Image (spheres, rainbow, N blue to C red):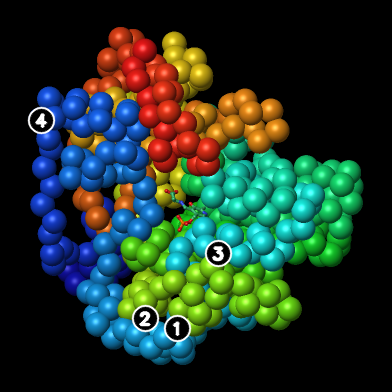
């Protein structure tokens, strides 16, 4: 082929097949246990995939949290840890990376996302206040409630329907937010809590226009707007692909513009930032920062490490720079899409459009004969493990927990089983295996029966609850 033609051909994704933009330098062997071993493991785990031993799992899609493969550069950074108790060099590298890529002024390091959620909730919520947000997340809402707040869902209605197509299902319904402010009074709103992407809605993004409008509405009423930035880089890719005016912007430009509309953010770095542990909280308001800085030393560690080792902070600072790389983020989300499209082609009901970090199988449609109180999504997670040692997670009535006032199950509109894809860990071939397993379980759906809960812990019950087959 003449060289001229090569020059005009696309760099990576628009030519022929798609491939992971890395090669493998170190491997961790995995094997599938026998059918008999899988049955025993599932019984011992009380039909809860959180209680399985990792060594009994073949392909682990429990979560994308802390399960990423770090790069050679991040590992090199681990060797550069400055383990001083105070003022570690790595903290300043982290602070610089957060300022450069997220734009916030003040940084508080924390051991992971929920550490940051705890601090922001305690500092910014007064007892009896409301915290509107674009759908709940388990730990986020619990920390808001423990601080005396009441979470109010203000996501657009489309987010509660797995079949509606909408490019930004994570958007805030501004009319819902305005109505809440009118009804309760601006002084009774602690802050508005938004997430990009929205985990429980299937990894659905929020648009730039929506955050801009949210900011305008909040400013009008003197209310702060805080962002859960855990998967914001994935959100930035969706803005680039779907929102007018962003196709030619870089992921880094989109990320910082989005954050500029908010007053601060908390972060579970175990996701976008490609590290196994870590997180942070960042704000622009100096008075809030002073309170947080005082509080972090009680619960997490000194304000220059917040529960992380120096080496963890270095790997995290480097992860921030890597995760906005265009090839990386396109292949990360591309892999999720690849799996989703295989399932859609086989008529398996999944949350649509396909989100950023996971495939959410619509368990209510998958098992229409299993009522919600018999835990269809939990059942599907158990069946997938039994079929081929693949570990997934329930995101339905078990995750939703009980209403603190009435004590009843909270029945969410979405009853989903999440197949969460770790970053840079599995290949397309693994995705093929997963798709075939879901298909095999789907083919036997009519013979499958639900579960009953036989043990239930008080908080975040999905982690430790136990079940028996009906
Ligand atoms: N916010 C979002 C959107 C999350 O997805 C998570 C964690 C957190 C906050 C809490 O962060 O785990 O570092 O304390 N999500 C994990 C998951 C657990 O599997 O989706 P953390």
In the foreground, 443 or 457: 457
Instruction: Inspect this view and state whether residue 111 appears.
Output: yes
Name the image quarter holding residue 454: top left
Figure label count? 4
Q: Quadrant of the C terminus?
A: top left
- Residue 146 % position (x, y): 64, 51
In percent of width and height, residue 313 lies at: 39, 77
Q: Nearer the viewer, residue 271 or 278?
A: 278
Contact between marks 2 and 1 (CB within 8 A): the answer is yes
Reading the image, the residue beneath label 2 is: 310
* Cα–Cα gap, marks 4 and 3: 41 Å
Q: Left or right: where does residue 70 sit relative to residue 130? A: left
Label 4 – label 2 distance at C-alpha:
42 Å
Asked whether mark 4 lies closer than 8 Å to ligand 1, one says no
Return the mark for residue 34.
4
Find residue 341 and report its image quarter.
top left
Q: Circle 3 sits in a helix, a strand or a loop, which is it?
A: helix
Which residue position is annotated with label 1? Answer: 91
* The residue carrying mark 3 has its beta carbon less than 8 Å from ligand 1: yes
């Amino acid at each position: 082929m003449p060289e001229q033609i090569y020059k005009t051909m696309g760099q990576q994704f628009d030519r022929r097949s798609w491939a992971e933009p890395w090669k493998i330098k170190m491997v961790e062997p995995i094997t599938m246990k026998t059918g008999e071993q899988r049955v025993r493991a599932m019984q011992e785990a009380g039909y809860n995939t959180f209680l399985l031993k990792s060594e009994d799992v073949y392909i682990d899609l429990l979560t994308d949290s802390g399960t990423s493969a770090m790069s050679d550069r991040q590992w090199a950074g681990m060797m550069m840890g400055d383990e001083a108790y105070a003022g570690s060099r790595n903290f300043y590298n982290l602070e610089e990376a957060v300022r450069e890529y997220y734009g916030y002024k003040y940084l508080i390091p924390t051991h992971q996302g929920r550490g940051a959620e705890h601090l922001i909730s305690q500092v910014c919520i007064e007892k009896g206040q409301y915290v509107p947000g674009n759908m709940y997340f388990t730990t986020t809402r619990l920390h808001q409630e423990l601080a005396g707040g009441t979470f109010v869902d203000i996501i657009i209605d489309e987010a509660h329907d797995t079949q509606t197509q909408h490019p930004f299902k994570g958007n805030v319904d501004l009319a819902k937010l305005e109505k809440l402010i009118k009804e309760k009074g601006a002084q009774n709103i602690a802050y508005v809590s938004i997430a990009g992407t929205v985990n429980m809605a299937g990894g659905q993004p929020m648009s730039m226009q929506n955050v801009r409008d949210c900011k305008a509405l909040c400013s009008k009423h003197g209310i702060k707007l805080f962002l859960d930035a855990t998967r914001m880089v994935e959100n930035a890719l969706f803005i680039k692909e779907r929102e007018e005016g962003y196709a030619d912007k870089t992921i880094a430009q989109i990320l910082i513009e989005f954050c500029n509309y908010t007053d601060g953010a908390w972060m579970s770095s175990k996701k976008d930032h490609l590290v196994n542990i870590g997180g942070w909280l960042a704000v622009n308001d100096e008075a809030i920062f002073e309170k947080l800085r005082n509080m972090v030393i009680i619960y997490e560690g000194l304000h220059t490490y917040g529960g992380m080792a120096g080496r963890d902070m270095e790997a995290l600072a480097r992860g921030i720079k890597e995760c906005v790389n265009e090839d990386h983020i396109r292949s990360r989300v591309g892999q999720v899409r690849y799996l989703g499209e295989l399932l859609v082609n086989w008529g398996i009901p999944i949350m649509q459009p396909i989100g950023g970090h996971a495939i959410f199988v619509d368990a209510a449609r998958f098992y229409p004969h299993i009522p919600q109180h018999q835990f269809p999504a939990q059942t599907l997670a158990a069946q997938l493990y039994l079929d081929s040692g693949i570990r997934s997670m329930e995101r339905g009535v078990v995750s939703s927990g009980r209403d603190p006032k009435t004590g009843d199950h909270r029945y969410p509109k979405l009853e989903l089983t999440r197949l969460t894809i770790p970053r840079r860990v599995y290949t397309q071939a693994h995705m093929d295996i997963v798709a075939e397993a879901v298909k095999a379980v789907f083919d036997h759906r009519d013979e499958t029966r639900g579960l009953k809960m036989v043990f239930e812990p008080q908080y975040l019950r999905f982690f430790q609850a136990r079940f028996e087959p009906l």
